[in-house]
Amino acid sequence: MKVVIDGDICQGQGRCFSIAPSLFDFDDLGNGVVLGDGTLSAETLELARLAQANCPEHAIFIVESS
Amino acid sequence: MTDKHAVVDFATDWDHTDPEWVNDPYPIWEDLRLRCPVAHTDRYGGAWFPASHAGVSKVAKDTDTFTSRAVVIGNGRPTEEDLPAPIGLAPPITSDPPFHQIARKLILPAFAPRPINALEPQIRALCNALLDEVVGEEIVNASQSYARLIPPAVIRQMLGFPEADTEKFIEMVHVIVEAIDLPEEERIEQFVPVEEYFTRQIEEHQANPRDDLTTFLLNAEIGGEKLAVEHVFGTMVLILVAGIDTTWSAVGASLWHLAQNPEDLARLVHEPELMTVAIEEFLRFYAPVTMARLVKQDVEYLGCPMKEYDWILLGFPAANRDPVVFKDADKFIIDRAENRHVAFGLGIHRCIGSNLARLELRVAIEEFIQRYPKFELANRNDVTWSQGQIRGPRNLPLRILA
Ligand code: HEM
Ligand code: SF4
């Protein structure tokens, strides 16, 4: 599984990188970005789900790794 | 407004300045959600109020149907003169796409997490200095002597205005924030000394550029051109108007909650690691900001016959209490793990100052409870709340307990 942020939906609400700094960072405008390629382990999947459940814009997606 | 009649039914005649709404709006919104999710009023020339999260969210994201050219409900329907399109009076909050994005991107970097987080030590020192002022007092007005003074002092520092002007600046800011509801002529009059002071500061920064927000704005460019001084001035005023009452209200409401919920206060004192999630719950439960839109043209929307230039009031605080989205929505849960609250709005106008607001709120609460691990309301009847689109306690006498 992989976590991705849809940059067109993200408004830089900042919840993801505050909850899961090991998975997310922010760019110069303060929008969320995924660290690395976003591949999730069993533990980080939980954390990614928590970040997803706190994103007011519904900009975070957890998808099958291709 | 003395000639106003009291509201009998908020579903058909709501008024966000009615004393019942000002004192405790939550039962009103809950009732509306159950029986009339989009309330209407003929007041203010005609206005709508969606009480559900779904309604607020849909309108906030639909910049085709609604415009932000006016975001504070005026006395009646706006006229064309009230709506200087497309840029608006105070870009980006009063701008619509496509200009909105240009004006917004311009200031976003200054409010991104990195520059904002660097302010933490100064904000902490400021909070401590304010607490030192009231040391030993048995009753502290936490709104007037604490929460009110934090946001303007932080912005004064960010703008790079002289520290010696802090008091003067705070007075000026309150003139601006209060004048925003006045008729055009009086507002202009009130603004004169402010304009003079800001112009002097801008000139001083043009002569001596340095690393602060004023210099940042003066150097900012749109399409290779520096901003007009009026644009710089307008953005400064917006930052003041958007950043001060709001954060003051959030800090005040959080302390109001802790004064009445000793078990939450004790948990925060003993489990400081809870602070990050607690801040989000304070923001959800006591979201201070409600913003308006105007309907662009006659449209059937959310099942309602909306007319051109009807107001629509976006109750972010009401959306935050919608049980469809939040489990136990009417309960304050200090360690709520899943919290998709919309206190900072939704969509393209999402609060630019949210990183700063969160930092100020967290540090203000941390320092207050560190100094005073136990306190209660001195007298419930002395607590007063602001009226209008920003809601927070304006008088909050707290009794400090040993
Ligand atoms: C707890 C404190 C705060 C709350 C609850 C809050 C809330 C909001 C909300 C709900 C909006 C959206 C308005 C809309 O949709 O029309 C907004 C916009 C804005 N806020 Fe805040 N705000 C806070 C603090 C601040 C601070 C500290 C600043 C800056 C110093 C700030 C600057 C802005 C700006 C510039 C906008 C306009 C953004 C745009 O239109 O793109 N706010 N705020
Ligand atoms: S929480 Fe959502 S909106 Fe906020 S930065 Fe992260 S992805 Fe973007």
Image: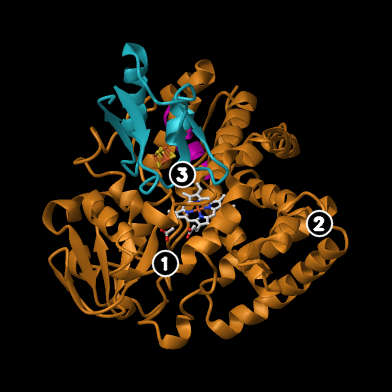
Q: Is residue B130 above or below residue B58?
A: above
Residue B272 placement, left or right of B308: right
Colour chain B appears in: orange
Disc number placed over residue B167 in the picture, else none: none
Tell me which amino acid carries mark 3. Gly
Q: Is residue B69 above or below residue A36?
A: below
Colour chain A appears in: cyan
Looking at mark 2, is its residue's CB closer than 8 Å to ligand 1?
no
Q: Residues within 10 Å of mark 1 (few under 14, many from 20)?
A: some
Query: At x 52% / y 51%, what residue is drawn?
Result: B352
Q: Is residue A9 above or below residue A52?
A: below
| Furthest-front residue in this view | A66
* Mark pair 2, 3: CA separation: 33 Å
Q: Which of the 4 image quarters holds residue B16? A: bottom left
Task: Name the residue beneath numbered marker 2.
Answer: B165
User: Which scheme is used to colour this image of the protein?
Assistant: by chain
Q: Which of the 4 image quarters holds residue B70? A: bottom left
Relative depth, front residue between B352 and B28: B352
Judging from the image, mark 2 belongs to the subunit labelled B
Magenta-drawn stretch contains B129: no
The x and y percentages for residue B350 are 44, 52
The x and y percentages for residue B30 are 21, 49
SS type, badge 1? loop
Q: Report the magenta residues as a range.
A: B251-261
| Furthest-top residue in this view | A42
Judging from the image, mark 1 belongs to the subunit labelled B
Disc number placed over residue B97 in the picture, else none: 1
